[in-house]
Image: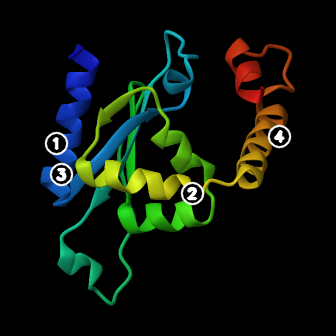
Amino acid sequence: MTDKKHEIELRLRQVEQQRGVKIIYAAESGSRAWGLASPDSDYDVRFVYVQPREEYLRIDEQPDFIEWQLDAVYDINGWDLKKTLSQIASGNATVFEWMNSPVVYRTSQQWENMCPVFRQYFSQKAAVRHYFGIAVKTFTKYLQDEKVRYKKYLVLL
């Protein structure tokens, strides 16, 4: 295991211990997953977790995500399985991107068993809307200046 992968695994264990959750899947998202990493690229680690059963039985609303670390090197956050299922059912392209990441830090039998069902919910129309939105945002926010990083053109495409 490389030093960074080892460091990421340590951070994932910290999440589990301090938040009392079980991470069932963790993968790289963003430029490293797309093969577009530059020397200053951070590690965009995304994970899916489950909570103890009693947490799902609460009547008060609880956060359904964990924002763990955001700095120059790591961007680590995750979604509760319930939120993940809701996003999959609505055709959210982000979850499918995580599922197809070539860099997987952690997986589980539970996750692997669910993936074939998840894939049935993929919507090309929803994915096109998602990526078109990213393209428009990238164009308006980053490509209007005189100096533009090459990476932004690749994100646009």
Q: Which residue is mark 3?
A: 16
Q: Which residue is mark 2?
A: 120
Front-lying residue, 57 or 123: 123
Q: Please, what secondary structure does the residue beneath circle 3 have?
A: helix
Q: Please, what secondary structure does the residue beneath circle 1 have?
A: helix
Looking at the image, tell me whether mark 3 or mark 2 is earlier in sequence order.
3
Q: Residue at x 45, y 60 (%)?
A: 84
Looking at the image, tell me whether mark 1 or mark 4 is earlier in sequence order.
1
- Is residue 14 toward the left or the right of residue 100 in the image? left
Marks 1 and 2 sit apart, C-alpha to C-alpha, by: 31 Å
| Badge 3 amino acid | Glu
Position of the C terminus by quadrant: top right
Circle 3 or circle 2, nearest the eye: 2
Q: Which residue is mark 1?
A: 13
- Is residue 32 toward the left or the right of residue 62 in the image? right
Q: Residue at x 22, y 26 (%)?
A: 7
Q: Residue at x 28, y 41 (%)?
A: 107
Looking at the image, tell me whether mark 1 or mark 2 is earlier in sequence order.
1
